[in-house]
Image (cartoon, rainbow, N blue to C red):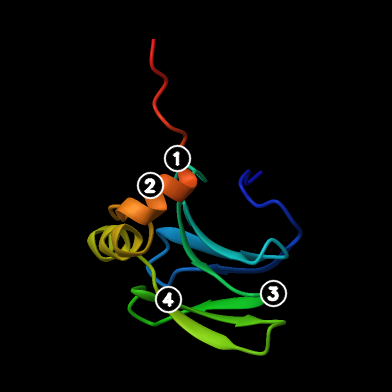
Amino acid sequence: MLKGHEGRVRGTAWSPDGQYLATGSDDRTVRIWSAATFEEISVIGVHQDKVASVAWSRDSTRVLTASFDGTARIWPAAPDFDRLEAHARGRVFRTLSQEERRRHLLPLATP
């Protein structure tokens, strides 16, 4: 049993090299699993709606998905964690301006 998806799994595909299983689900995620241990390796993509189907490239480096959101996408089978981290840092982590500090942060308590 694969534990990780939070919705019905609609698509599964074994990688051509036999090392991985890709799944797509109603929870909108595309996940990669180890064929040896059936443990989740990573979430490689998220659609805007349910994932209807998944398929592998012949060289096992990419996964093609189709979704109820009307799109088909190609995802790298092994996520580029450096790129993802840089993207997240650029969108989430930043220094607040003085105005934002005044508006959103509680003043320091004085004894």
Q: Of 53 and 83, which appears nearest the observer?
A: 83
Question: Looking at the image, is 69 positioned above or below residue 41?
Answer: below
Q: Residue at x 44, y 59 (%)?
A: 20
Q: Is residue 51 left or right of residue 106?
A: right
Classify mark 4: helix, strand or loop: strand
- Whether residue 100 is visible here, answered yes or no, is yes
Q: Are marks 1 and 2 in contact (CB under 8 Å)?
A: yes
Mark 3 sits on what residue? 49
Classify mark 1: helix, strand or loop: loop
Any mark on residue 23, and which? Answer: none
Question: Looking at the image, is 25 positioned above or below residue 104?
Answer: below
Any mark on residue 75, and which? Answer: 4
Mark 2 sits on what residue? 101
Q: Earlier in the sequence, mark 3 or mark 2?
A: 3
Find the distance from the CA under tag 3 to the CA under tag 4.
16 Å
Any mark on residue 105, and which? Answer: 1
The amino acid marked with disc number 1 is: Leu
**Residue 52 placed where, x, y %?**
69, 77
The amino acid marked with disc number 3 is: Asp
Classify mark 3: helix, strand or loop: loop
Circle 4 packing at 10 Å, graded few (<14), some (14-19), many (20+), is some
Q: Are marks 3 and 2 in contact (CB under 8 Å)?
A: no
**Residue 43 placed where, x, y %?**
48, 58
Q: Of 95 and 19, which appears nearest the observer?
A: 95
**Residue 50 placed where, x, y %?**
71, 72
